[in-house]
């Protein structure tokens, strides 16, 4: 087995540490260069050349906002239509349905039992 002196081991350790430090520094520089290149390419693509067609880069957002505003206006139109005057026949059907609901004997028995059921569950 090969045995080194402590000074030699310390030199090897420092050499390896410095090599890794240099690799990290180079990698950081390369990453910043790549980021800068990406930004430059994106900016050039946004600006384009003189004869290029102009695209809207935020078109998704503008279309989405436009659709939201349309849906809001459509909802308001529907609300206005729904709030409008009901025909006499429609009002008659509504009132008959409410009367039938309140005069149902099964519903009355359920309503009579509810307070007792509530008291049993709570207390």
Image: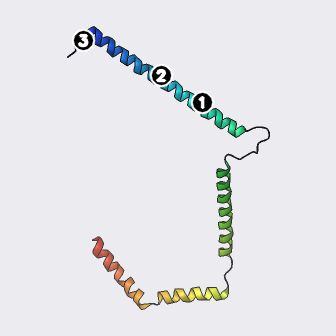
**Residue 93 percent coordinates (x, y):** 59, 88
- Residue at mark 1 to residue at mark 3: CA–CA distance: 46 Å
Kind of element beneath mark 1? helix
Mark with earlier residue (1, 3): 3
- The residue depicted at 29 percent of the width and 73 percent of the height is 121
Q: Nearer the viewer, residue 112 or 14?
A: 14
Numbered marks: total: 3
- Residue at mark 1 to residue at mark 2: CA–CA distance: 17 Å
Mark with earlier residue (1, 2): 2
Residue 79 versus residue 14 in the image, above or below:
below
In the picture, the disc for residue 36 is 1
Q: Is residue 33 left or right of residue 107?
A: right
Q: Quadrant of the N terminus?
A: top left
- Quarter of the image where one finds residue 105: bottom left
Residue occupied by mark 2: 25
**Residue 16 percent coordinates (x, y):** 36, 18
Q: In this view, does 51 lie to the left or right of 112?
A: right
- Residue at mark 2 to residue at mark 3: CA–CA distance: 30 Å
- The residue depicted at 68 percent of the width and 50 percent of the height is 59
Residue 54 versus residue 66 in the image, above or below:
above
Kind of element beneath mark 3? loop
Q: Which residue, as the protein is rendered here, is positioned at the far left?
A: 1
- Quarter of the image where one finds residue 52: top right
């Amino acid at each position: 087995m090969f045995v080194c002196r402590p000074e030699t081991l310390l030199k090897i350790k420092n050499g390896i540490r410095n090599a890794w430090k240099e690799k990290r520094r180079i990698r950081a520089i390369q990453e910043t260069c790549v980021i800068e290149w990406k930004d430059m390419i994106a900016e050039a693509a946004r600006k384009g050349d003189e004869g290029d067609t102009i695209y809207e880069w935020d078109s998704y957002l503008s279309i989405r906002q436009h659709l939201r505003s349309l849906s809001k206006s459509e909802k308001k139109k529907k609300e206005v239509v729904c709030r409008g005057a009901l025909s006499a026949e429609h009002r008659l059907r509504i009132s008959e349905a409410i009367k039938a609901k309140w005069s149902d004997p099964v519903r009355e028995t359920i309503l009579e039992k509810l307070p007792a059921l509530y008291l049993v569950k709570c207390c």
